[in-house]
């Protein structure tokens, strides 16, 4: 078992008492971005991690979903486990009707392993460009093509953790992958940076039906406290231009954050401030996740 390093940031626990939403979500609504962590004695952490995660179980996550009135959820493999997806897979096995997974895999993963993971509820691969970038503004396109060719027939997608502002020709670099692409955290552009060529490229991809964007983790884009007012402009821009390609997620249990621990009810209510149209709520919370994650 990997011992916890005293030199790494210790993540605090999530708020166990989510506030009630001002309005209940539509039936079959989905939280498309969350992580489970632990138990530590069963699932060792990678040596080159950036933080020590909290204990955050599948049972606790389901409790949060129930408190907000959400039916479905998507677990995304956190970086602290590398390509060891067992902690996530254990939870998927307990809640196969309610949860789907996004795994982290080596680019040369065997096709047999992909089919095994599909049977266990995985529907996509996460590519962490923030930490694994091959060079400023350049993506590992050859490796991504190799992976995309393996997962295409199963209807999987690639999810990117990346600052899209660092890739001015993002759409040109990714246009040959020919599978759905998902971008986290509204494109992950800090609010002190003006919307850039990379952000515009992400929007162009979404307008062509090639990309989906998660409205997640506004606190990662700003130094402001809740309700993170400087993020509003980015959220409203996406809602105005590509509403048909958006999904919402909690980012529970909010690992490795530099701001105060958010309450998940507050985060959902902020989303309701952004989206007041019931038909659009249905698209973002139900229809798009059902399509991308094969519920």
Image: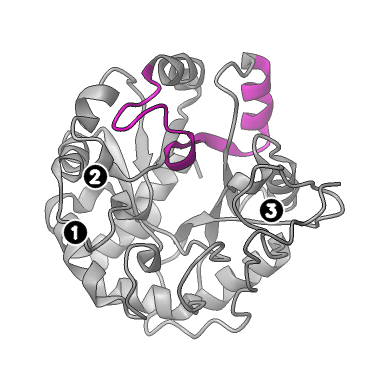
Residue at mark 2 to residue at mark 3: CA–CA distance: 36 Å
Which residue is denoted by mark 3 in the rendering? 95
Instruction: Using the rendered view, name the quadrant where residue 41 is placed.
Output: bottom right
Q: Is residue 276 visible?
A: no
Q: Using residue 290 as the reference point, say whether residue 273 is left or right of it.
A: left
Q: Which residues are magenta?
A: 112-141
Foreground: disc 2 or disc 3: 2
Whole-angstrom CA distance, mark 1 to mark 2, is 19 Å
Residue contact at pointers 1 and 2, CB within 8 angstroms: no
The answer to whether one can see residue 268 in this image is yes
Categorize mark 3 by other alpha carbons within 10 Å: few (<14), some (14-19), many (20+). some
What residue sits 72% from the left and 51% below the top? Answer: 91
Circles 2 and 3 in contact, beta carbons < 8 Å: no
Describe residue 264's horizontal placement relative to residue 48 as left or right.
Answer: left
Q: Which residue is mark 2?
A: 165
Please name the residue shown 36% across and 50% down the image: 287
Q: Earlier in the sequence, mark 3 or mark 1?
A: 3
* Magenta stretch encompasses residue 165: no
State how far apart marks 3 and 1 are (Cα). 31 Å
Q: Secondary structure at mark 1?
A: helix
Q: Which mark is residue 239?
A: 1
Name the residue rendered at 20%, 61% in the picture: 234
The tag on residue 93 is: none
Secondary structure state at the residue bearing disc 2: helix
Left or right: 269 in relation to 27: left
In this view, the mark in front (1 or 2): 2
**Is disc 3 in contact with disc 1, using a CB cutoff of under 8 Å?**
no
Residue 31 picture location, percent across and down: 47, 59
Quarter-wise, where is residue 108 in the image? top right
**Residue 270 in the figure: left or right of residue 100:** left
């Amino acid at each position: 078992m990997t011992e916890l390093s005293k030199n790494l940031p210790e993540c605090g626990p999530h708020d166990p008492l989510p506030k009630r939403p001002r309005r209940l979500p539509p039936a079959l609504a989905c939280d498309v971005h969350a992580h489970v962590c632990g138990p530590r004695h069963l699932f060792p952490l990678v040596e080159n991690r950036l933080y020590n995660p909290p204990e955050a179980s599948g049972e606790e996550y389901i409790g949060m979903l129930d408190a907000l009135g959400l039916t479905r959820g998507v677990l995304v493999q956190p970086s602290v486990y590398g390509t060891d997806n067992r902690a996530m897979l254990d939870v998927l096995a307990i809640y196969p009707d309610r949860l789907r997974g996004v795994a982290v895999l080596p680019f040369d993963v065997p096709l047999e392993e992909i089919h095994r993971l599909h049977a266990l509820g995985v529907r996509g691969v996460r590519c962490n460009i923030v930490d694994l970038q091959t060079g400023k503004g350049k993506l590992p396109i050859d490796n991504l093509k190799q992976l995309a060719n393996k997962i295409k027939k199963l209807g999987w997608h690639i999810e990117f953790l990346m600052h899209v502002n660092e890739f001015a020709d993002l759409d040109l670099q990714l246009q040959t992958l020919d599978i759905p692409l998902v971008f986290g955290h509204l494109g992950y552009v800090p609010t002190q940076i003006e919307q850039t060529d990379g952000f515009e490229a992400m929007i162009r991809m979404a307008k062509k039906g090639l990309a989906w964007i998660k409205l997640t983790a506004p606190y990662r884009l700003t130094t402001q406290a809740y309700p993170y007012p400087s993020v509003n402009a980015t959220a409203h821009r996406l809602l105005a231009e590509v509403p048909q390609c958006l999904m919402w997620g909690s980012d529970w249990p909010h690992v490795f954050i530099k701001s105060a621990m958010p309450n998940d009810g507050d985060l959902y209510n902020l989303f309701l401030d952004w989206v007041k149209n019931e038909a659009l709520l249905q698209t973002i919370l139900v229809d798009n996740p059902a399509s991308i994650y094969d519920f």
